[in-house]
């Protein structure tokens, strides 16, 4: 991965930038409100941008979907900060787990532990809010939200 | 009679006139705000021009609603400074203080001094001259952040330099405003030293308290709904401002310090909640400010205002040029940074309003209005074409 430079923009947000393999300087501004800007720097005047694309929060999600990057971690971290006592865990379904081929409903996780499975990461794409009939396969990562005790119980069952 | 019935009974013919007047002003302002957003500038210079056009002895007579309008305008200043204080997190302030000290000093020397000297040359009292220095010193963060956004320059290499200068100016105002307010109030030299000392101690205490216990305050404010939070912050701002005023520190600085003290979640939510209120109240403040300017006071101050604008524009260009150069930015970027800083706005008007009680008050207000309007024309236009002003 290229080296990413981070710059704080007081009153605005944060800017990240890097140089692509082909030598083009690009960057992203994350506004405090959640808005993003994609920057393409000018080759002639490297201090300024020759193109700026404005993205709403919704646009950013669309673009992320196209680029195949998971934004779940990002927004979950924000949730974690807002609600005290709430934990998040990423539980991989390894080969040999008793849940391979079984659905979320089979586990009855919410009933027994209070933990919700809010997303499943599969092959670098993310299934947000999976339905109860979602069937696990090897290599899935279940993103679970709940109390610390609940999460420990779910991890034990999913990996056993 | 219950309170509600009393209020209803008071809604008589006098109140009816006031409603119509205030409503008409608000509708007029909404048109100006619309024009401003179409043209791509902030509405502040347009509000000032509207106030000037309808000023003393103009078309509208606001006697019936003047009490209400005056109080609204004063709350407008408080909310304006509250949001200016909310602009930056305490981390950003600390970094700004560390990295921006030298550019900040250069900024002060090049831009405060011309105003101060002109005030003394005009034979004004020292407090009035110091206020004029403040007017020429501080760039408008409102206008600059809007222009940066509109011209798509937030990603530019020189932009952090520009923003850091705004942070430093913000902090400098936390010291300058109470001192200036104390100077305006103080009479005998011994008294003045005393009031300035009280003002500085109060600011340091509130600032220290805010940075130390601000997160406790911020956390306790976020427990409720938006409604509880809005009321709590609004009330807190008015109470602190009122207490500061009683200690002769100026209410504005109290509100500003409340903004600085709030951080994190509370800061973000308050910004979102207070901004609509601020737009409403501050619009009234700007119109009222220029409303009270006598048009006859304008012609004599035009030449000094123009001279001051040219001199301090060069001062800002030099500041931006040097500061951006330190950050390794090229010639065109340095020119963009310098010209970007030219526009003055909300702070200049707040400073000028502080001097209302001085004998030079009317002249100061007229000069400030003319000066702000000139720099608001020079700034955004020159920065738009900054790339053509220098060779790469």
Image (cartoon, coloured by chain):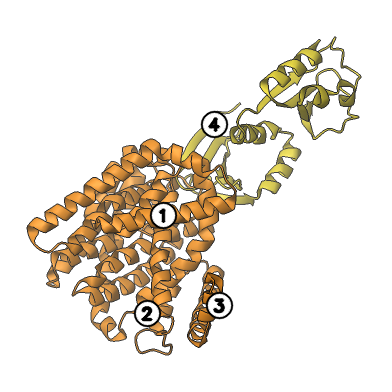
Q: Residues within 10 Å of mark 2 (few under 14, many from 20)?
A: many
Residue B324 % position (x, y):
36, 46
* In the image: residue B128, left or right of residue A132: left
Q: Earlier in the sequence, mark 1 or mark 3?
A: 3
Q: Which residue is mark 2?
A: B291
Q: Residue at x 51, y 58 (%)?
A: B275
The Cα atoms of the two marked residues, 2 and 4, are separated by 52 Å
Q: Which element type, helix, strand or loop, lies under badge 2?
A: helix
B300 or B249, which lies in front? B249
Locate residue B78 relative to residue B294 in the image: left or right.
right
Whether pointer 4 and pointer 1 mark residues with C-beta atoms closer than 8 Å, the reply is: no
* Colour-to-chain, yellow: A
The chain under label 3 reads: B
Task: Examine the image and state in which quarter residue B288 appears.
Answer: bottom left
Query: Residue A8, image x and y in percent?
Result: 47, 40
Disc 1: CA contacts within 10 A as few (<14), some (14-19) or many (>=20): many
Q: Which mark is residue A137?
A: none
Q: Which residue is mark 4?
A: A4
C-alpha span from label 3 to label 2: 31 Å
Which residue is pictured at 35% across the width and 51% down the height? B170
Q: Colour of chain B?
A: orange
The answer to whether tags 4 and 3 share a subunit is no
Eye-nearest disc, 1 or 2: 1
- Mark 4: secondary structure: loop
Whether residue B370 is visible, yes or no, is: yes
Residue B8: mark: 3
């Amino acid at each position: 991965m290229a080296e990413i430079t981070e710059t704080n923009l007081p009153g605005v947000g944060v800017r990240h930038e890097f140089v692509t393999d082909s030598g083009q300087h690009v960057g992203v501004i994350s506004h405090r409100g959640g808005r993003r800007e994609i920057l393409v720097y000018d080759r002639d005047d490297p201090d300024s941008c020759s193109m700026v694309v404005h993205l709403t929060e919704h646009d950013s999600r669309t673009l992320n979907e196209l680029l195949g990057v998971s934004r779940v971690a990002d927004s979950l971290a924000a949730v974690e900060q807002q609600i005290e006592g709430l934990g998040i865990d990423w539980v991989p379904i390894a080969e040999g787990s008793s849940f391979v081929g079984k659905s979320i409903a089979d586990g009855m996780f919410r009933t027994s532990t209070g933990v919700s499975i809010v997303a499943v990461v599969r092959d670098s794409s993310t299934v947000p809010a999976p339905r109860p009939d979602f069937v696990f396969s090897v290599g899935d990562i279940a993103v679970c939200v709940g109390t610390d005790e609940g999460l420990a119980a779910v991890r034990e069952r999913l990996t056993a | 009679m219950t309170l509600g019935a009393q209020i209803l009974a008071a809604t008589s013919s006098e109140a009816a006139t006031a409603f119509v007047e205030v409503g008409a002003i608000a509708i007029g302002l909404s048109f100006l705000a619309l024009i401003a957003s179409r043209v791509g500038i902030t509405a502040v210079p347009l509000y000032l021009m509207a106030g000037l056009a309808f000023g003393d002895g103009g078309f509208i007579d606001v006697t019936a609603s003047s009490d209400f309008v005056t109080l609204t305008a004063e709350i407008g200043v408080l909310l304006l400074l509250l949001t200016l204080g909310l602009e930056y997190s305490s981390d950003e302030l600390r970094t700004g203080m560390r990295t921006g000290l030298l550019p900040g000093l250069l900024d002060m020397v090049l831009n405060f001094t011309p105003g101060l000297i002109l005030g003394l040359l005009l034979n004004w009292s020292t407090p009035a001259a110091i206020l004029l220095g403040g007017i020429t010193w501080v760039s408008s963060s409102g206008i600059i952040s809007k222009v940066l956004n509109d011209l798509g320059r937030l990603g530019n290499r020189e932009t952090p330099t520009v923003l850091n200068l705004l942070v430093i100016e913000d902090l400098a105002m936390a010291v300058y405003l109470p001192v200036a307010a104390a100077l305006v109030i103080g009479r005998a030299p011994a008294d003045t030293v005393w009031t300035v000392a009280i003002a500085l101690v109060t600011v340091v205490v509130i600032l220290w308290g805010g940075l130390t216990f601000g997160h406790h305050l911020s956390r306790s404010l976020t427990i409720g709904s938006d409604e509880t939070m809005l009321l709590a912050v609004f009330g807190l701002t008015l109470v602190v401002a009122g207490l500061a005023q009683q200690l002769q520190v100026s209410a504005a600085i109290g509100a500003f310090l409340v903004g600085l003290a709030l951080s994190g979640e509370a800061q973000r939510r308050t910004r979102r909640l207070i901004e609509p209120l601020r737009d409403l109240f501050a619009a009234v403040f700007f119109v009222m400010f220029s409303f009270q300017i006598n048009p006859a006071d304008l012609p004599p101050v035009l030449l000094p205002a123009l001279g001051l604008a040219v001199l301090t524009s060069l001062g800002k260009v030099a500041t931006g040029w040097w500061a951006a150069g330190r950050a390794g930015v090229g010639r065109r970027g340095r020119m963009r940074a310098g010209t970007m800083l030219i526009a003055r706005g909300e702070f200049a008007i707040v400073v000028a309003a502080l001097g209302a009680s001085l004998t030079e008050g009317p002249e100061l207000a007229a000069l400030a209005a003319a000066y702000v309007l000139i720099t608001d024309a020079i700034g955004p236009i020159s920065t738009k074409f900054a790339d053509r002003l220098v060779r790469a």
